[in-house]
Every structure is written in structure tokens, then in C-alpha cells.
Image (cartoon, rainbow, N blue to C red):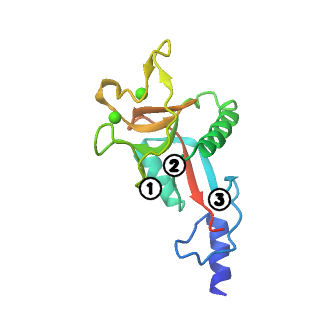
Amino acid sequence: MRKILLCLACITLGVSYADNNCTSCRECPAGWKRNGKSCYFFSISKETWIRAKRACENMGGHLATLATVAEDAFVSSYLKSIQSHLSDGKYVWLGGHDLFSEGQWKWVTGETFSYTNWRKGGENGQVQNPDNAMGMEHCLDWSNGWNDNICHHKHHFLCENDLCV
Ligand SMILES: [Ca+2]
Ligand SMILES: [Ca+2]
């Protein structure tokens, strides 16, 4: 009974349980997009990176971490499809930062970057990100590729939550 209740809560809230109690939690909550064992939530509202990080945690997940080519391709395709419906959805916060040590990029889950998809920036695409522009860019956004950006700027964000399947 407890397990059933846990799973109902799991499905409703999108919470995954570290102890794998919730083995039947196979669906993403309403409003979340599924890819493999992960669910993704795109926020229409805009927040600073740290507030976006907390918002994802409050929903039982974390800012999205893109560990593989396949996951990056899925998220890029998903965000491009959403972006076309938003007038100002250029930047979307992801769960990466080099806040602790300049140039040492980590995911919010503690993993180092095993795969990257940094995009070119600047007026004519002559700048290779991460460029740590003005010495102030320590948080990762998706903007048709990865870019380091100023953490206290407010942008849309993407949360991720793993299913316990
Ligand atoms: Ca930086
Ligand atoms: Ca940059």
C-alpha cells in the first residue's frame, strides 16, 4: 500500500526515489517531456540561474544535465521546437557551471563534463565559448548550442528528472 501511494505521489509530482521504491513510476508528470529514462520540464517563466536551480530542486529534479550526444540532440531538438513559439526564448539555463573554479565546468549533479557542445559566439561567430566574457560568465545556457552566460541574468530554464524504471 505504501508503495502504491509512493508511486502515485511519484507520478503526480515527478519525484523519483533514490531507494528505487517506486519501480512502477514509468510516466513523466503532465507537462514534462520524456526521453528515455528522463523527463524534462521547460519553464515559461524566467529566473536567475540559482533560482532556476532551486525551482527544479523544488520539483524533485535538477537543472538539465546533458551527458551524451544523444541527450544533447534530443534537448536541442525539443528546445528548438519550443523556441519557435516564444518571442524571447533565446537562452535557456542548463545545469552546468564553473562557479567554484574558472574553466572547471561541472554539472549540478557533481559530474564533470564528459561531452560538450559549446557554440561559437560574437557578431560574426568569431568567439569560441566558453569565453567567460568580461570575466563574468559562469553558468551554462543552451542557445542553439552551449554558452557560458552571466548567472544573475533571468532566462527560461530546463529541469530534468530521472524515472525509476
Ligand atoms: Ca566562467
Ligand atoms: Ca559566453
Amino acid type shown at disc 2: Thr
Residue drawn at x 69%, y 32% is: 85
Dot 3: element? loop
- Mark 1 or mark 3, which has the lower sequence index? 3
The image position of residue 64, as x and y in percent, is 53, 49
Residue, disc 3: 37
Residue identifier under label 1 = 109
Q: Residue 142, which numbered label?
A: none
SS state under label 2? loop
**Cα gap from disc 3 to disc 2, whole angstroms:** 13 Å
Along the viewing direction, whichever of 96 and 5 lies nearer the viewer: 96
Within-10-Å neighbours for mark 3: few <14, some 14–19, many 20+ = few
Residue 65 shows which numbered tag? 2
- Residue 79 position in % (x across, y down): 64, 37
User: Relative to 47, does residue 54 appear above or below in the rendering?
Assistant: below
Residue type at mark 1 is Thr
Looking at the rendered structure, the kind of residue marked 3 is Lys
First in residue order: circle 1 vs circle 2: 2
